[in-house]
């Protein structure tokens, strides 16, 4: 069988581990042949591909990013997108596709599979961990470790100087990275997109921490928003979502805390550092097992499915589930970690 | 309520995170008071304890080891052990115990709870991940990351020189660390205690790897054993389990591979490096949540239970389950990773 | 002999290693007694101190920050500052001071020693490495390693996506951290405070890198400034040094590159992460040897001196040299690394 | 000008950084062309080479090992070795050679240059830091950091359990790695090849440490030897240098300490882990600058020289100096760190 592989969306540690596992097992155990499409759906539209044999995937396990490149191209929004994809598949005699990506990439795969008879198996990927169909996505553990290590380092300053330390981490729509790294790093405040924050409450936690003679560490997800947009607007420092983006919520919050509490604040913005570099052992394990099971699904002809983690097992769920619902931090869990605030 | 806390068995990254979470939540939310017993059951026998209030647990989250000390003392094997424990509890007016430990420690807790009305809640701990009642134990992820990083480094030499590189990792009875780190590190052979290995098969994998112009990396759990004890005995290099221990199975295997294949082999023995240092973010998250839920169980009077991980949830299971069955690597899972051998 | 120890200025990995070495050698070899003053010169003004014996310095070698605390207090600017210091020294019968700090702290020590007969030995400390009297200061190597690791991670994204990645690192007046981490991390542009940068030249390098199909990584020291303030002013985004600080030069430069090249840019601001956490092995070695030699200088009565690194030797130089001249990146060295730009 | 490049001897983090710097500067600034010979002198004997242009050296800066491969081949001991080298150089019209290696590789280069008119510039490389002509060699700082991190982790166990922890690090003839990592890691005993050790003295330090209620950490260089070979011989466990190698001096010493003190001991043998993986920032800086200056020397026709570090400067010294004298730890320096033993 000839099988295509593509990676879509933002980069994420573990993509290469999936590709390697797919090819190793598919070639060795099933005798399949693999073609990698360049830059996500873009390569399938344009017919740009590379051969994926065992030498091609050697040494890529510990490498971040994706050897296939990626893009945010949505072929369903391109003129003749579906036709061009079907043509590429026909020309290259590709019988099945393994699509590795997030909500967008898998949503396209689900549509192609359901409506256009393109035989797809999905592998879920998002550094934000916000796909509801799986316990965890790979890349997330790596990002959390990087953010936690940064918070660990800030504690040194927190013990020696009386400054507020604000760390902005990834998470536009879900606060998983902030929650896990903030808890693991022993942060004194954790702010997530799921719940608008009250700057005065943040300042109260900050002051309470200072009273214990330690400097406070505030972890804020990039998508977290203050409760009262109006109040903020009056300062001239935030008039819209776009304006916050100008300097980021972390920088904005530092200024607000300085203004309201009179304490100096310093900001760290980790940015893409969180999604780069070598995957953690957990992410390599998860990504590899996803790859092994995805190729099993292809081999068994179980299309329209996606691999997912349930406990310690890899299971298959319908592809449509991948995009059914954003997995956000529920209020109970957020409350559970609130015992460490202040 | 006055609650005692103790840590037993070998050290394991995350113990301090459990203690901190127990105290933070117990004091702040429930108003309990906490006493830490020194050196596991030993401190309970001898009445040696320290007060655990919030300042006492400050800053311990990222620190490996246990601020309470540990021991392998089994009070059920000490003269008047149960009576002495009951006396200490009475004198210090301790109404419940949170016992953090592995099979041995939790086995004692189960017995004390069932037979002697000592009110216990357990928190499972083993770096080897071999407790069947929980998806994962804390400490394991840290150990796997350390071993994986070591294997990553060996690949550099494997690419530049033609040497066999043998890494001995922890795991006396279960091969979880070898399996996870070997997979994550891209090892060419993984040997676990669950399945006796055939040295000739190992040499065949080694030679097959050399033919691809890369040097092989062999990961071996400290408890892995060769298939044919007799064969080995004849070499004069292994006459009993004890003799293998003299130099360790890693060193022994290196010599055998050198002898049988004619290739140079080098050994790395990570030893206690795997169980030390700061816990990974995952282990801190898991240990902290175990602590939060253990104190909930105490507060609700749900004794004779143990906290456990199921998927992403913390649940309670009977303490007796902790020791019911060693969780070993099952043959299907071991076969799954076999695609990467050679 | 009774000897006082203090740490002044910003925190810096290695301070504790100096303190430990001073105490270990001073107590064991010379039988001296040590007193640590809290929060730099502030503790000496207020008579706040702690006893420093061998148990007090146990386990502090790998810990960032300073167990003594620090401050930026300049006693020469305090009312009766010198008199209060002399009084504290007399009351506590302190015969000599080991002062660990940067330009400010050591400048005060030099003055006290020269003008007021306070017997001082200095240990140079600055994470920025900008003291001319010594080859390196401790803390610098740690900061460079942290920044380099962050740049390494960004390469993953640089290989998979076509975005400009801007990293702002420490260095208000000297570009050593930017230069070393930029070189070690393989950055495509390095901007330092010593030489005002031309945004158009930066954009030219960025575009040249894109033409090689890789995304550019730009490392900018926090104190780097664009050449043409006026041009910038017209954008309304930079009207003074203070205004750049609002969002930092990194964020500002990202916006400018986006505006001028049309490419997306992402910013990482490492902030205090660079000065926290455990010191690198080199910094522990250097800080420890500085401590050992500082206590030798005290023992030999060689006051008014400062320890310094020359090659692999620790030497003594006059304290006044510490503040004589800021050690900045010279144009030849900056030109040497220019071969890697673009 | 056509310039050849080769790497000889054991692998060492930073080799690729040298190659990259040589090619980047040589091509961009001087317009030279570069040829890399495979597997050290072996490739020059056999005429196996690859073209080294700028794309060929892209992305190699952070990678350990050497893209050219290495060997221990000594062409002066091969039949017609010199003639074959001269023939390869003539056929490929190579006018100069940059030889990157240790004592052996540079010794050959010195001879070829002096006696056979092969125009060579040397770059010193040894992970053991035992070349007297340069303050430091690249690779050493990386190895010391890895060993120090391992020792750091062992402290966790040392604080929780009463076990002796023995770490064997690299260093056959010189104790630099043991000395630096032992000091940086806060070891209680450091044993180096330069000075035979007295096992009873080691046991005395071990016991003294136990009395302070901490477990001792013993760092031993692989080439360290006990004082009294005879005593050891009687145990049947060490009859010659070769026999120690059977299990390594670390394992041997653990057994001896157990036997003599009655305390349990555990061994860690880091092995090739120390020479693998990505170079530290310092090593990348040093290796890159060595490369830049080596290509300058070639360009200026300054053959028979080697680049070297003096303080913060890169200088040139005669190639013959590289092999003049092994740089070992002098007794004064070893005595300086002795204050931390026990």
Image (tube, coloured by chain):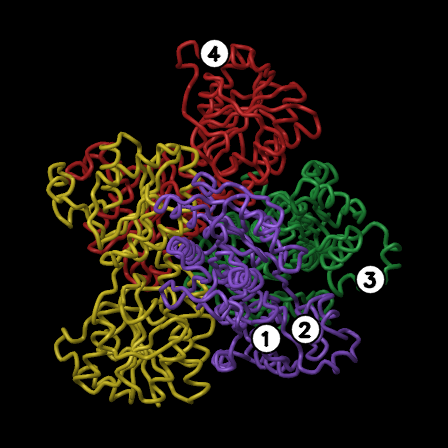
Chain colours: A green, B red, C purple, D yellow
Mark 1 and mark 2: Cα distance apart in space: 11 Å
x, y percentage for residue B6?
51, 25
Name the mark on residue A237.
3
Q: Are marks 4 and 3 on the same chain?
A: no
Mark 2 chain: C
Mark 2 Cα-neighbour bin, 10 Å: few <14, some 14–19, many ≥20: many
Task: State which quadrant residue B144 falls in.
Answer: top left
The residue singled out by tag 1 in the image is: C191
Q: How many marks are shown on the rendered structure? A: 4
A148 or B199, which lies in front?
A: A148
The residue singled out by tag 2 in the image is: C253
Callout 2 secondary element? helix
B127 or C142, which lies in front?
A: C142
Mark 4 and mark 1: Cα distance apart in space: 69 Å
Residue A4 visible to an observer of this rendering: no
CB within 8 Å, label 3 to label 2: no
Q: Are marks 1 and 2 on the same chain?
A: yes
The residue singled out by tag 4 in the image is: B84
x, y percentage for residue B164?
28, 54
x, y percentage for residue D241?
15, 50
Mark 3 and mark 1: Cα distance apart in space: 29 Å
Rendered position, C34 above or below C329? above
Mark 3 and mark 2: Cα distance apart in space: 20 Å
CB within 8 Å, label 3 to label 1: no
Mark 1 Cα-neighbour bin, 10 Å: few <14, some 14–19, many ≥20: many
Q: Are marks 3 and 2 on the same chain?
A: no
Mark 3 chain: A
Q: Are marks 4 and 1 on the same chain?
A: no
Rendered position, A62 above or below C259? above
CB within 8 Å, label 4 to label 3: no
x, y percentage for residue C117?
51, 58
Mark 2 and mark 4: Cα distance apart in space: 69 Å
């Amino acid at each position: 069988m000839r099988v295509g592989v593509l990676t879509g969306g933002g980069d994420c540690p573990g993509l290469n581990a999936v590709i390697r596992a797919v090819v190793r097992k598919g070639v060795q155990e099933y005798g399949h042949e693999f073609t990698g499409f360049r830059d996500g759906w873009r390569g399938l539209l344009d017919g740009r591909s590379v051969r994926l044999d065992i030498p091609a995937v050697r040494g890529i396990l510990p490498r971040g990013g994706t050897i296939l490149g990626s893009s945010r191209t949505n072929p369903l929004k391109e003129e003749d997108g579906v036709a061009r994809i079907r043509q590429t598949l026909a020309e290259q005699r590709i019988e099945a596709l393994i699509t590795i990506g997030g909500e967008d990439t898998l949503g396209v795969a689900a549509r192609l599979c359901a409506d256009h008879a393109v035989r797809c198996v999905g592998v879920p990927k998002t550094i934000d961990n916000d796909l509801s169909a799986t316990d965890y996505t790979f890349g997330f553990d790596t990002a959390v470790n990087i953010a936690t290590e940064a918070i660990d380092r800030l504690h040194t300053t927190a013990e020696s100087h009386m400054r507020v330390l604000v760390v902005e981490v990834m998470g536009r729509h879900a606060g998983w990275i902030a929650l896990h790294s903030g808890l693991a790093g022993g942060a004194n405040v954790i702010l997530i997109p799921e719940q608008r924050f009250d700057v005065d409450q943040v300042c109260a936690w900050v002051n309470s921490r200072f009273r214990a003679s330690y400097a406070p560490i505030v972890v804020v997800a990039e998508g977290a928003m203050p409760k009262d947009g109006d109040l903020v607007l009056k300062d001239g420092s935030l008039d819209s979502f776009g304006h916050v983006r100008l300097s980021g919520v972390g920088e904005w919050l530092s200024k607000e805390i300085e203004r309201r509490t009179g304490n100096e604040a310093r900001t760290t913005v980790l940015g893409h550092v969180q999604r780069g570099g070598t995957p953690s052992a957990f992410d390599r394990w998860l990504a590899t097992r996803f790859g092994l099971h995805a190729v099993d699904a292809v081999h068994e002809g179980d299309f329209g499915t996606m691999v997912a983690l349930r406990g310690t097992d890899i299971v298959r769920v319908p592809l449509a589930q991948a995009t059914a619902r954003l997995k956000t931090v529920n209020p109970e869990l957020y409350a559970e970690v609130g015992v460490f605030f202040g």
